Amino acid sequence: MTKYLFLTLAMAVVILGTLPCQPMPPIAADRLDGKEIMRRVNARSRGQSSQMHLEMTLLDAKRGDFHKSILMRRTHLKSGYRTSYWIDAPDHEKGIALLISEDSTQHGMWMYFPASRQVLHVASRGFPALASDFTCEDLLAEIPLEDYEFRVNGREKVAGTYLVKVEMIPHDERLRSELGFSKSVGWVRDDIWMIVRADYYDDKGELFKSFQAEDIEKIQGVWTVRTFSMQSRRIQHGTKVHVMDTDYSLRLPDTDFVPGKLSTGPGAPPM
């Protein structure tokens, strides 16, 4: 009787497609088009809210390295992410802040400069973020799918892991001019739907900057990049960022992520 009961339960598990601790395998990326792959990259969990302390190093072979400490906070509202950055060091940049809102109810980018106590709207997504090799576009939590055309360029094995290559082309000349590249190629880990490398090409088809993500680990249930970098090949300059600590358990007030709060937020210096 016990034998037949076990077989019956096993058949039920197969029919229902549920096995404890054995989730259904994801659809292989080679069966998806480029836009669907990037939609899954966008849908990857980044936590409802998060706070990270970042150590940013600007790498310059001629002038030497330059270091910044940055507080990053992010929240996910119903209609999109909002992310804020405050520079904590060095002293002469302390309090400079950047807010990137992908929230459709108040979409845009703003910077705060404590010396003038002004909050300024950032007009271009290609604007250098916090004087680094990253642009504001590079720091978006999600890729604006409507702004690009996508094409899958096969798979490639990198450091023992197979990655799917997706080409992204800005859909019009105005956007290409604003972003500063004619196309980019991203390498996606389709087991966790994360871009771990990206190359950017100019109008002549020449590679001019490269992104790399390293030290990827799961923190509080969220796949997190601990080290990432951008290398600008034209000027032989780079930016490397180390995530010093991460907290996904915070509940951050939505009101902290508005342009007017950049002067009084947790990373702002005393007035």
Image (spheres, grey):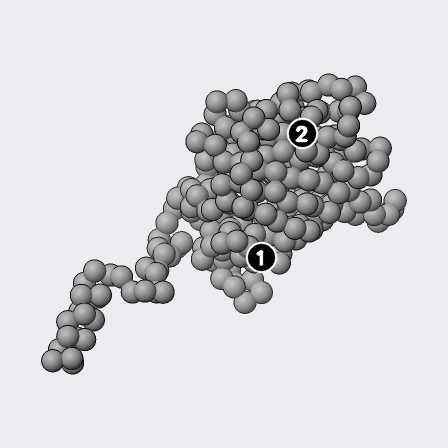
Residue type indicated by callout 2 = Gly
Query: Vertical placement of 3 versus 89: above or below?
Result: below
Rounded to the nearest angstrom, the CA distance separating label 1 from label 2 is 29 Å
- Residue 204 quadrant: top right
Please state which of residues 120 and 163 is positioned toward the viewer in this rendering.
Answer: 120
Left or right for 73, reference 106? right
Q: Position of residue 127 (x, y in %)?
A: 67, 30
| In this rendering, position of residue 6 left or right of residue 76 | left
Question: Mark 1: which amino acid?
Answer: Ile
Q: Is residue 241 left or right of residue 50?
A: right
* Label number found at residue 265: 2
Q: Residue at x 69, y 45 (%)?
A: 54
Mark toward the start of the polypeptide (1 vs 2): 1
Q: How many marks?
A: 2
Q: Position of residue 44 (x, y in %)?
A: 46, 47
Q: Which residue is mark 1?
A: 216
Is residue 101 in view? no
Name the residue: 22% across, 65% down.
13
The image shows residue 89 at horizontal and vertical percentages of 80, 39
Element class at badge 2: loop
For the residue pair 18 and 215, the one nearer the viewer reads as 18
Residue occupying image coordinates x 59% and y 52%:
225
Q: Which mark is residue 44?
A: none
Query: Which x, y percent locates residue 60?
Result: 82, 46
Q: Taking 65 as reference, is 142 left or right?
A: left
